[in-house]
Amino acid sequence: MTELAIDVHGLNKSFGKKHVVKDFSLQVRRGEIYGFLGPNGSGKTTSMTQRFSLWEDLTIRENLEFVARMYGMKDRKGAVSESLHELKLHERQNQLAGTLSGGWKQRLALAACMLHRPKLLLLDEPTAGVDPQARRDFWQEIHALAAKGISVLVSTHYMDEAERCHRLAYIAYGKLLATGTPDEVLHRVSLSTWEVAGSPAKLSKLAAVLEAREGIAHVTAFGNTLHVTGEDEAALQRAIDEYRADADLHWMRAEPGLEDVFIHLMRGVSEEAR
């Protein structure tokens, strides 16, 4: 049987009369990157959280040495030097943490978390506010850690990051809506999707009309296009047929993505639960 790094059953949390996490269960295997997704206020951070605060008036090395002392590590200098090199921070080790960009601050936070060689990392939206290249570099480090057998539970709002995870859990208002590999979650709901391109003004008017039509579950803007999604292929086809003749609109079949699935799942959450 695969070793579990997290094995949680029937987790509940309440703030007074407000029941924010409801009978939540989660299993994360050793060496697995498990994505924790959900809208703001859904209960992700309330269920499990880890926050690391940087001391901005200390250098990178001083921050790591301070954390190593808090852990009571014996070979602090050796562990810090190793961590600096592993996370590619050695060339900046004398730079004040307060002068770092968001991406480098997150890299420093990860280095501090890894000093004592943990078997499990809990990362709460670790790439929020960092640029795309820094996000990519950070995820390369996460996959390198997972390859060494370290388990990672990471919350994120980015769908491209969700696709980088081995498995996903989607939570909404304290309840688990879906779990599995990205491919399993993607095919959990049978959806049909059309993509339509046109001018912004044309698409804005079209979206307002289509959202009210029978057979259409939701209409979502993606850049200069709309994703028009429904559960029943025939009903969706009937709903869009008259608009496909418009020469100013360009329609094509599209594969539903994780974002389409999660938006659809959210539609099924009752107003009471929200």
Image: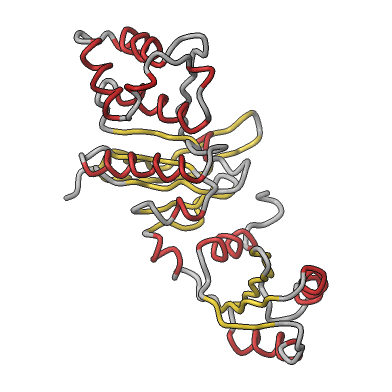
Q: How many marks?
A: 0
Please name whichever residue, 229 or 95, is drawn nearer the observer in this view of the structure.
95
In this rendering, position of residue 202 left or right of residue 158: right
Residue shown at the point (67%, 77%) measured from the top left: 196
The type of colouring in the image is secondary structure
The image shows residue 270 at horizontal and vertical percentages of 67, 57
In this rendering, position of residue 179 left or right of residue 274: left
Residue shown at the point (53%, 34%) measured from the top left: 46
Please name whichever residue, 147 or 26, is drawn nearer the observer in this view of the structure.
147
The image shows residue 212 at horizontal and vertical percentages of 79, 75
Please name whichever residue, 117 or 22, is drawn nearer the observer in this view of the structure.
117
Residue shown at the point (39%, 65%) measured from the top left: 184
- Looking at the picture, does residue 218 appear above or below residue 248? above
In this rendering, position of residue 187 left or right of residue 118: right
- Looking at the picture, does residue 51 appear above or below residue 147? above
- Looking at the picture, does residue 148 appear above or below residue 87? below
Residue found at the very far left of the displayed protein? 1
